[in-house]
Amino acid sequence: MIKAVMVMNTQGKPRLAKFYEYLPVEKQQELIRRVFAVLCGRAENVSNFIEAESIFGPDSRLVYKHFATLYFVFVFDSSENELAVLDLIQVFVETLDKCFKNVCELDIVFNYSKEMTLLENIFWIHTILDEIIFGGQVLETSSAEVMKAVEEISKLEAASNAITLIPKSASGWRSR
Amino acid sequence: MNPFSSGTRLRDMIRAIRACKTAAEERAVVRKECAAIRAAINENDQDYRHRNLAKLMFIHMLGYPTHFGQMECLKLIASAGFPEKRIGYLGLMLLLDERQEVLMLVTNSLKQDLNHSNQYIVGLALCALGNICSAEMARDLAPEVERLLQFRDPNVRKKAALCSIRIIKKVPDLAENFINPASSLLKEKHHGVLITGVQLCMDLCKVSSEALEYVRKKCIEGLVKTLRDIANSPYSPEYDIAGITDPFLHIRLLKLLRILGQGDADASDCMNDILAQVATKTESKKNAGNAILYECVETIMSIEDNGGLRVLAINILGRFLSNRDNNIRYVALNMLMKAIVVDAQAVQRHRATILECVKDSDASIRKRALELVYLLVNESNVKPLTKELIEYLEVSDQEFKGDLTAKICSLVEKFSPEKIWYIDQMLKVLSEAGNFVKDEVWHALIVVISNASDLHGYTVRALYRAFQTSTEQESLVRVAVWCIGEYGDMLVNNVGMLDIEEPITVTESDTVDAVEVAIKRHTLDLTTKAMALIALLKLSSRFPSCSERIKDIIVQNKRSLMLELQQRSIEFNCILQKHQNIRSALLERMPVLDEATFSGRRAGSLHTAISTSTGAPHNLQNGIAKPAAAPIADLLDLSSDDAAAPSSSGGDFLMDLLGVDLSPASAPSGTSQPPKAGTDVLLDLLSIGTSPPAQSSSSASDILSSSQDNKAPLANLNGLASLSSLPANATSPASPVPMMDLLDGLGPIPQKHEENGPAYPSLVAYESSSLRMTFNFSKQPGNPQMTLIQATFTNLSPNVYNDFLFQAAVPKFLQLHLDPASSNTLPASGNGSITQNLKVTNSQQGKKSLVMRIRIAYKMNNKDVLEEGQINNFPRDL
């Protein structure tokens, strides 16, 4: 089971945090800080695993990937395959990439592009994540399938047109 | 409409937060935004719900409380439109704080949405349920989810499958309802659904033996076939990663097969062929292929034995170990840890490679490799492996030295074939990384040295040499000064020379030089210096020619800022000057320390089971039979018999050994009070010469208790040196006269105070459900305005209090002086107390009585607690 997904920038500011087991918000912050403290001390050419049991308790593993200014961190237990989770991070980042153009260069929550408001971003990123990981279990591993599901949702939003801040079409939020 | 909430857009808020230079600024911005959002929620503002919720999610991510948004989420979920429901559920999943009433309220909406005609709304509800489902919700909604496992749309089916996992984890009893629909998911063609179906079956098998049996019987062939199909399948772009078809599905299938094969030979047989195929055919150039191989190896290791496959698996791990990719090496080490249980011999073959991994530049790999090496060591290979590890210790990173040192010490202790080897290796470790050596480890070393009487000379000379080169390693210095103190004469005379030793010329004054270095080097801590001081005292009787010089060094420490050293040097000086007749007896070599007792205590302090004693003589850990009946405390306490069994274990060994204050708290400032226990032994030490005194052998603990019982004299003593641990306490009527002589350098002996007695009854000044504070009063003759109060704090709760701080305030006509407290930790359930002395001077004595306001702060379970009160019921004429 996946316990948590975190994205933080190289200053340690959280950019996405989703915990699949309930934790009080202060505890979440503490964990993010402690993970960052370990991550920022690691060199470039080392493995993508760090010992997580001291931070997350017994039976915890941590895999991270570093893209430009962002760390993508997945925490999980021994029922997941470390190398596979590494590929799963890749699926997540690729999907975000396709949705938002180069994720690596933008702060996930702080996209300056003109039309796409930040408002949508925080919702959309969670929507994308929810299509990949569901309650701590891997739901979908194909980036194309995830995109398809998210596009459907986007169309539905546009059709109901209830909230004007939602872009008019799926291509609308994707291309900007 | 609320004028504030419309003010900032999310983007502006994020900008404002990011622009903040300090945490305080950020808090201010967030506070303002939260206030606006609350106001909008209260006014039921429809227009900005979406935006406000997005803001709340952002604020939540930064770690601020957002629970007030939960109800807003519920409202959104209850509305009809898809967009509202979507953000409502998204928000709820993040903001929910497990409050039962919210969960109850949402259950109804979930039920409706799970039955909604719009499949996307069903998807939203499933997702929310999969994230927040409680046991109650699981019972209520399981039928809906079960039905959705057969829904026409694959996206809903896969979500329902994962949601079922959450349900059966919360309520395992529900598992049997899911067995049939789950096993039919295994026939799915859609990869996404198949992955989730396999996952669901796996979790079912974990919680229900019925499900395990069912899947084993009915599905195993289908699973093997599916695995064969995808392993042989041609390129399918959707689920391809780096040229390998759906590695995730591969892995899930291998995991499920593992569960089915474990403990079942038939099932294991069934999958042998496909496992062999996956293990040999999978492309290992890319991460995805290696992920499959890794999983396959684990499955082979876990299912029932098939020799051929195991060899294959270990070989794959061997290849992994030599892979250039750090990740692959890391997982190989991980897997070898498991493999060692199955086939230690096979893992031993890779020892050299694993040892190389201990020296890797990647901290994660080093740590894993070290753990693995630790498991690989046995009696036959301990020497070469230890040699390698110690060599590496010299060049390893600082942050790795702690782990490495602990492991080496543990190995050396566990497997050492002979004492001299053990001592040699420990000396190497102490010289290289003495600062990382734990106290109990070098305590154990001293015990072993003490027992190896034929090696005393060898050891002290080796330590002397090592000490010449590394004076910065604290524990090396400690062991060295201890041995020099005990066996200094052997150092000078080359007693007990071994063949392997090179002769060494050390004069008596060289020896004293070495110890003097330890006392004067300011980087060394109080314990070390105190040990050095004792060593000097001992040397004074071994080396009469140096005794003047030793006396000078001891006298210099009378001015030490550290109270402990100051006090010791005064006492030692007293011994040297006035008690020549007993000196040599007093400073005799320590008797041999009892290994069994020490290890018993150590084991006791480590909470390990002591029942098994397979006593190989060299094995320190074992051979523990009797509980600490004849404690090491008796080390110095020559006059005492076994009656003095100290209750605490382990940690106070050194205190017993040296009579030194070990607690780090007292190290930095010379003014803090040394703990009481620390000096007990010194007292005993001093009593050695006075041939079994009237004082009972349990004097040490008696003093402790007497200092609590006779509070008045203690309070008076306080004026002297604020030391409850002063051996002067020994001036209880029972103590023999020679003892007092020893201490007469200390000035006035406060015995006369005893006749004062407590003239005032003690007072429970404050009592709450968690804490009691009692006051004991006494007066000093000739100063009627001043009252000495001894406050005693007792913990009435089952939790330890840390950072305990007592504060008091008095009106202007009173003057208050607070001495430091005896401790800042208050043991749970009244198992000990803190005492603190107060001096109150009443300028209007006789007219006004004392009054005091108090505040007590402490940490319980890391939470700050504050208790306050006012004391008006002091005895009248204080």
Image: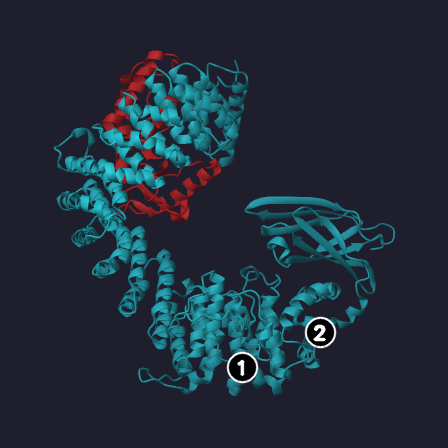
Chain colours: A red, B cyan
Mark 1: amino acid = Arg
Quarter holding the C terminus of chain A is top left
Label 2: state its secondary structure: loop
Residue located at (62% from left, 53% from top): B829
Q: Are marks 2 and 1 on the same chain?
A: yes
Q: Is residue B77 above or below residue B671?
A: above
Estimate the x, y position of residue B403 in percent, counting from the top left.
37, 58
Mark 1 closeness class: few <14, some 14–19, many ≥20 residues within 10 Å: some
Q: Which residue carries the number 1 mark? A: B549
Residue located at (64% from left, 73% from top): B699
Label 2 and label 1: CA atoms lie apart by 32 Å
Estimate the x, y position of residue B213 in percent, counting from the top left.
29, 40
Q: Is residue A176 above or below residue B818?
A: above
Residue located at (33% from left, 27% from top): B160
- Between tags 2 and 1, which lies in front? 2
Estimate the x, y position of residue B23 in percent, counting from the top left.
49, 36
Mark 2: amino acid = Thr
Q: Nearer the viewer, residue B212 or B762?
A: B212
Q: Nearer the viewer, residue B377 or B815?
A: B377
| Residue B654 visible in image | yes
In the image: residue B40, left or right of residue B856: left
Residue located at (46% from left, 80% from top): B511
In the image: residue B797, left or right of residue A4: right
Q: Is residue B222 above or below residue B4?
A: below
Going from N to C along the chain, the mark reached first, 2 or 1, is 1
Chain for disc number 1 = B
Estimate the x, y position of residue B539 in percent, counting from the top left.
51, 81
Mark 2 closeness class: few <14, some 14–19, many ≥20 residues within 10 Å: some
In the image: residue B676, left or right of residue A169: right
Q: Is residue B687 above or below residue B218?
A: below
